[in-house]
Amino acid sequence: MTDELPDRAVRAFEGHDAFERDSEWFSVTTTAFDARVTAAETDEWALAYTLEVRAPMLSNAAEETVGSAVEEGWFDTYELRLEDAVMALREDLAFDDQRVVEEAGEAVAVFEFEFGNAGRVPDIAKAIAEYAEGTYVEGIVPGYEYGPPVSALLSRARQSDSEGDRGPMPL
């Protein structure tokens, strides 16, 4: 990706209240995790997008030591569950690349895709980022104390569950 963003992508993200510009990236403001998206021209009419969602590895989220087998199992499950991220969309979309890698104590989910209607992409990126966050919370391993931002996400999930406006709490 270059520093030169396509004008139609810039207009779309700047016109959406869930994003803030950060150089060649647009940060998602509706998630507790670092989520950001950028765009580039292609040889076709569609634009190419890269969305990154950075969440703490389980061992960095927990207040106590997490065994390597537990963390590996958690990471594998998180990666597998994120393969279903397109199910969170109302658009017909296929990822050109979708991966989760461990980087500096973070689980970094990367979604790359092309899409022709730049005006729809902010909603797509927001939905995928929120899906990744929800998937993370659902996959939290019980029995550990968690620090911020995971503790706040778990607290919010418990409150929503007790008010009856969400599905069952994962813990």
Image: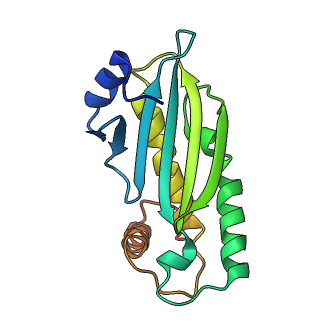
- Name the residue located 49 percent from the left edge and 62 percent from the top edge: 55
Rendering quarter of residue 148: bottom left
Vertical side of 154 occupied by 15: above or below: above
Q: Nearer the viewer, residue 140 or 8?
A: 8
Classify the position of the C terminus by image quarter.
bottom right
- Name the residue located 43 percent from the left edge and 24 percent from the top edge: 120
**67 lies left or right of 121:** right
Q: Nearer the viewer, residue 3 or 39?
A: 3
Give residue 50's position: percent from left, percent from top: 51, 36
Q: Nearer the viewer, residue 104 or 74?
A: 104
**157 lies left or right of 11:** right
**122 lies left or right of 132:** left
Question: Would you say residue 58 is visible in this rendering?
Answer: yes
Give residue 143's position: percent from left, percent from top: 57, 88
Give residue 22's position: percent from left, percent from top: 29, 41
The count of marks equals 0
Judging from the image, the colouring scheme is rainbow
- Name the residue located 40 percent from the left edge and 76 percent from the top edge: 151
Question: Would you say residue 171 is visible in this rendering?
Answer: no
- Name the residue located 37 percent from the left edge and 60 percent from the top edge: 32
Vertical side of 139 occupied by 84: above or below: above
**50 lies left or right of 165:** right
